[in-house]
Every structure is written in structure tokens, then in C-alpha cells.
Image: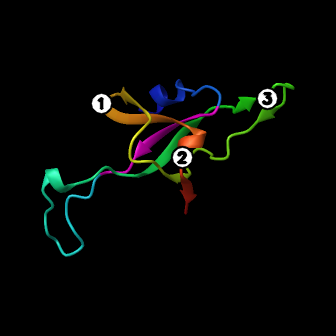
Amino acid sequence: MASSLKRILPLFDRVLVERFAKETTTKGGIHIPEKSIGKVLHATVIAVGKGLRQKDGTQVPVSVQTGDKVLLPEYGGTKVEIENKEYFIFKEADILAKWE
């Protein structure tokens, strides 16, 4: 898995993320039906592009780094499947927040 992901480097201000697993049970142990489970909005950053280049040639770095936990919008991103796992590519501007 790691060898395939090391070959993927997002371009410009793009960020490759892996969404957290869906919670199928509540804290009390009740199983949630699959239809009732919403989209997972939390993800871990897997790879980051180098950032945008401005008109004067300076590079603007991306504000998230590999390993950061981020909050994503409900819709958007490009789905990428690598070794039977789903990953998503988002523009940096689409990421809502970084959390610890």
C-alpha cells in the first residue's frame, strides 16, 4: 500500500486524503442501518502538492501537511481507488478546517 501511495503526488494545491471509517454502531452498542449512515467528513491527509505558483513566480505552500486530520465538505473531491481503498483528491481551498 505505501509503495503505491508514494508514487502519487498531487499537483499544485491538491491534497490526497483518506476518509475515516464509517461508524456502524453507537457508543451504546446499537447498530446503525447502512441507509442512516451519512458521509464521513473527517479525513487524514496522505499526500500534498507543492502549492500554487503566483504570477510573480513565488510558490505559495499548502497549509496542511501529510498526517494532518482535516474536515471536508459533504460533497466534492475526486474519488481515486488505489489497491481496493478509496481516497479523495481535494483542492486546498475546499478543505474546511484542520483539527487535532
The residue mark sitting in front, 2 or 1, is 2
Give yes or no for contact between labels 1 and 3 (Cβ–Cβ under 8 Å).
no
Verify whether residue 46 appears in magenta.
no
Residue 68: x and y in percent read 56, 51
Report the front residue among 66 and 42.
Answer: 42
**100 relative to 38, above or below:** below
Q: Determine crowd level at label 2: few under 14, some 14-19, many 20+ residues with C-alpha closer than 10 A.
A: some
Q: Is residue 73 left or right of residue 33?
A: right
Q: Determine crowd level at label 3: few under 14, some 14-19, many 20+ residues with C-alpha closer than 10 A.
A: few
Residue topped by disc 1: 84
Amino acid type of the residue tagged 3 in the rendering? Gln
Verify whether residue 14 appears in magenta.
yes
Q: Main secondary structure of the magenta part?
A: strand
* Measured Cα–Cα span from mark 1 to mark 3: 37 Å
Q: Which label sits on residue 61?
A: none
**57 relative to 65, above or below:** above
Q: Which label sits on residue 95?
A: 2
Residue topped by disc 3: 54
Looking at the image, which residue is at 59% across and 42% down? Answer: 93
Q: Which of marks 2 and 1 is nearer the N terminus?
A: 1
Q: Which of marks 2 and 3 is nearer the N terminus?
A: 3
The residue mark sitting in front, 1 or 3, is 3
**In the rendered structure, which segment of residues is drawn in magenta?**
13-21
Q: Quadrant of residue 91?
A: top right
Amino acid type of the residue tagged 2 in the rendering? Ile
Q: Is residue 19 left or right of residue 37?
A: right
Task: Name the quarter where the N terminus is drawn.
Answer: top left
* Measured Cα–Cα span from mark 2 to mark 1: 24 Å
**33 relative to 5, above or below:** below
Residue 28: x and y in percent read 19, 76
